[in-house]
Image (cartoon, rainbow, N blue to C red):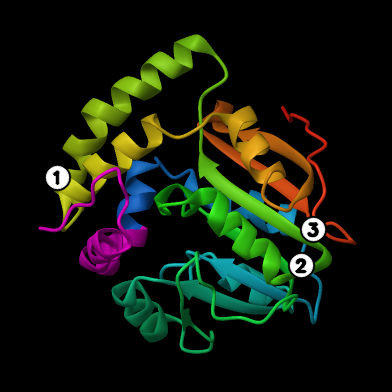
Amino acid sequence: MPRADLDKQPIEVAAMFDEVAERYDLTNDVLALGQTRLWRRAVLNAVAPRPGERILDLAAGTGTSSVPFAARGASVVPCDFSLGMLRVGRRREPELPFVAGDALRLPFADATFDAVTISFGLRNTVEPSAALEEMARVTRPGGRLVVCEFSHPSLAPLRTLYSRYLMGALPAIARRASSNPEAYVYLAESIRTWPDQAELAAIIGASDWCDVEWLNLTGGIVALHRARRPAQGPGPAQGGAGA
C-alpha cells in the first residue's frame, strides 16, 4: 500500500491519501480519541466566518471541515490535491464546490478570499513557507489565515506520553481502523519532526503574513495559529502565544 516518505513528494502524499479516503474521517476520530470535533469547532470560531464571505478551506479532504463554514452562510471552497478525497467528498457533500488544487500552485486569482484556513495539511506540503506565501497571494489585504496543525505539548509529562502514543499505540490502532496502516506511521513521523508553536509562528510571519499568534489545544498536542494579510504588502510578524 502507498506510504509517503518525509521528503513529502506530492505524488506520493496524494496517493497515500487517495488510499485512505473512504475511511479517513472515521479513522481520524478514533485515533484522536474524539478530539477532532473540538479542534474543528476551534477552527470555526477562529475563522469567524460571516455570511457572504469567501473562504478557502485548503487540504479540505472530504469536506467535513468545510460544512460548518457553509452553515454560517459563508461561500466556502474546499480544495485538496487528493482526487480520492475529492471523490468521496463530492459524493457525501454534493452541495460543496470541491476544487482540485496543489497548495504550492493554487488555481485562484490574487486576493480572491476573505479568509484561508488549512487543518492538518500544511505539514504535508513539501515547502510549507511557499504554501503559506501562496495562501497569502489568494487572500485579500486585511484577510485572515487560520492554521490548525499538530504541535508539541507544553508540559513535559504530556510530551512523553504523547510521543509513546504516536510511535507505539497509534500505529497499532491504525492497523485495526485504517485501510492503509502504513499511512499512519508516516503521520506519526511527520508530527515528531514538525516545528513547535514558536517556530511555526516565525515561518508564518516570514511568509507574507503579520500579527501572528497561536492558541494551544489539548495541551499543545494541536496548535491553532492565526495571522492577517497586511493591508499594504508583506509585513513582519508581531509574535504572540496563547494558552
- Residue lying furthest front: 233
| Chief secondary structure of the magenta portion | helix
The residue that label 3 is drawn on is 229
Query: Quarter of the image holding residue 160?
Result: top left
Q: Nearer the viewer, residue 130 or 148?
A: 130
Q: Position of residue 27 (x, y in %)?
A: 30, 53
Q: Determine crowd level at label 3: few under 14, some 14-19, many 20+ residues with C-alpha closer than 10 A.
A: many
Residue at 29% across, 43% down: 6
How far across and how far down the image is residue 68, in percent? 62, 68
- Check the image and report above or below for 75 versus 14: below
Point 69% across, 36% down: residue: 215
Q: Which residue is mark 1?
A: 175
- Residue 5 covered by magenta stretch: yes
Q: Horizontally, is 226 left or right of 63 in the view?
A: right
User: Separation of disc 3 and disc 2 at Cα?
Assistant: 16 Å
**Which residue matches tag 2?**
49
Residue at 65% over, 77% down: 70
Q: Position of residue 71 (x, y in %)?
A: 67, 75
Q: Quadrant of the N terminus?
A: bottom left
